[in-house]
Amino acid sequence: MKTVTFDSPTQGTISYTDKKRGLWWMSALYPLFPITGLVLHGLTGIELMLLVPMVAAYICVPLFDYLLGEDLSNPPEEVVAQLEQDRYYSRLLYLAVPLHFITFFAAVYWIVTQDLSMAGYLILAVGAGMTSGLGINTGHELGHKTDPLSRLMAKIVLAVPGYGHFCLEHNAGHHRHVATPEDTASSKMGENIYAFALREIPGGFKRAWQLEKVRLQRKGKSMWSPSNELLQSYAITAVIQISLLIAFGWMLLPFLIIHNFLAWWQLTSANYIEHYGLLREKKANGSYERCQPHHSWNSNHVFSNLLLYHLERHSDHHAHPTRHYQSLRNFEDVPALPNGYFGAYLMAYCPPIWFAVMNPRLLNLQHIQGDLSKVNILPGKREAMEQKYASLVAA
Amino acid sequence: MKKYQCPDCSYIYDEAVGHEHEGYEPGTRFEDLPEDFACPACFVREKEDFVPLESDSITSDCAKNKNSVVRSLKK
Ligand SMILES: [Zn+2]
């Protein structure tokens, strides 16, 4: 246990021990967990064992979130700088990067060497894709850092599922425009996750290319120059995935397509639940108010937070995007998800359940109180929402 | 040459340095940055939010505890 201290001129010595410090290994090692499915399959010969990692993610994790509940503790503000200078936390991030490659190649090895049924092949491709979606989360935390090593690691880990445009799209696109109707990565009230995916996936891709084009123009470089950071990451993807196709043939093509798409879908799922219906107010000069903690749905559920580098403390993350994962705070009275992300994804995949749980939650938020003008709502859904939630909507 | 600071993440735009990655050459004046300029570190504060710095000192409000901290890590 490591204790950090700060000598405050007014409050004396402040000392703080991060109880989660050793537990962040969970986030670093979780990318390897899907290999347990391969091992169990190998040992028992039962193909369905390949499902174990998915069952764990979508049944055990929400259950542990429910049972273990929330962690509301925050580090004292005075020690945050020291916490962020402690290299231990960033090393745990770097460690996750090669582990994502190991799991990806382990899945490929299994596809190539085992005589899998169609179902086994599909389960493995979906599971590998979900793990690479987790890699987008690793890339996310790395991509918010400003040092060259972290940014390089982000590009590398995002290359596993071919999502190299994510960093730019996320930082300069999504963060800047979050919780506005213009943001393709903020979901609207009444919009189901499947419709959202059709807006979010191509929208993010287009926005990233637009942003990179403008940046390169300022530098007097062409879109196709080696300085294009999207192309740099895509190049890694191309080398890996094309080499695999050359080495093992077309049998890997469906695997790669499913794997890549499922990873993108994981990100879509996170984006869908993180800002559902939330809206920043427009100021008199036409610009939006700056992002506040109540512009993100937050979750303090301790178990899934420990698997995701605190991603679920999303309110603080969006209000202050450069804060490192270990110092993200809980805020009082921010929009709160009923479970961690894994449980929330399950709800989102079944839109009637998502709407039934989240629409009343949204309308009851302290800063909304039934005022639909303060909700990011799908334009065509307004009247239907007014009728359906008449008792919650302010007259 | 002047300096301007992001009030959220305390990134400093120094006109003498510019911002190479974003394509702003050393010597690019703050007023010559495009109107849609956003903080290249956090992206959640825009040109109008930046605070001019009088001298080389960082305003206490911006620095929070980020740059002026007593380091004392104990085992
Ligand atoms: Zn900033």
Image (cartoon, rainbow, N blue to C red):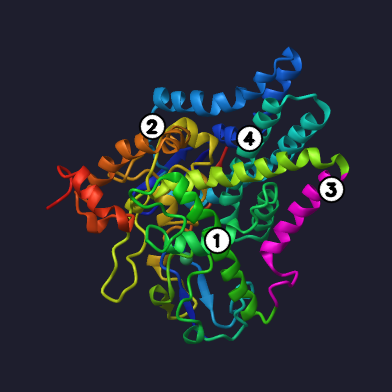
Tag 3 subunit: A
**Disc 1 on helix, strand or loop?**
helix
Of callouts 2 and 4, the N-terminal one: 2
Instruction: Please rate how many residues cluster around mark 1, counting C-alpha atoms within 10 Å: few if below 14, some from 14 to 19, many from 20.
Output: many
Circles 2 and 4, Cβ within 8 Å, touching? The answer is: no
Return the mark for residue A70. 2
Q: Are the residues under badges 3 and 1 in a single subunit?
A: yes
Q: Is residue A92 magenta?
A: no
Label 4 to label 1: alpha-carbon separation:
25 Å
Q: Are the residues under badges 2 and 4 in a single subunit?
A: yes
Residue type at tag 3: Ser
Q: Is residue A307 above or below residue B26?
A: above
Which of labels 4 and 1 is toward the front? 4
**Mark 4, residue position:** A126
Circles 2 and 1, Cβ within 8 Å, touching? The answer is: no
Q: In this image, A42 relative to A210: left or right?
A: right
Of callouts 3 and 2, the N-terminal one: 2
Depth order, front residue of A366/A317: A366
Residue drawn at (39%, 77%) of the image? B48
Instruction: Please rate how many residues cluster around mark 3, counting C-alpha atoms within 10 Å: few if below 14, some from 14 to 19, many from 20.
Output: few
Q: In this image, A360 relative to A351: left or right?
A: left
Which of labels 3 and 1 is toward the front? 3
Circles 3 and 4, Cβ within 8 Å, touching? The answer is: no
Name the residue at the left extreme. A395
Q: Is residue A4 above or below residue A206?
A: above
Return the mark for residue A243. 3
* Figure quadrant of residue A351: top left
Depth order, front residue of B24/A187: A187
Q: Is residue B14 visible?
A: yes
Q: Which residues are magenta?
A: A222-246
Return the mark for residue A169. 1
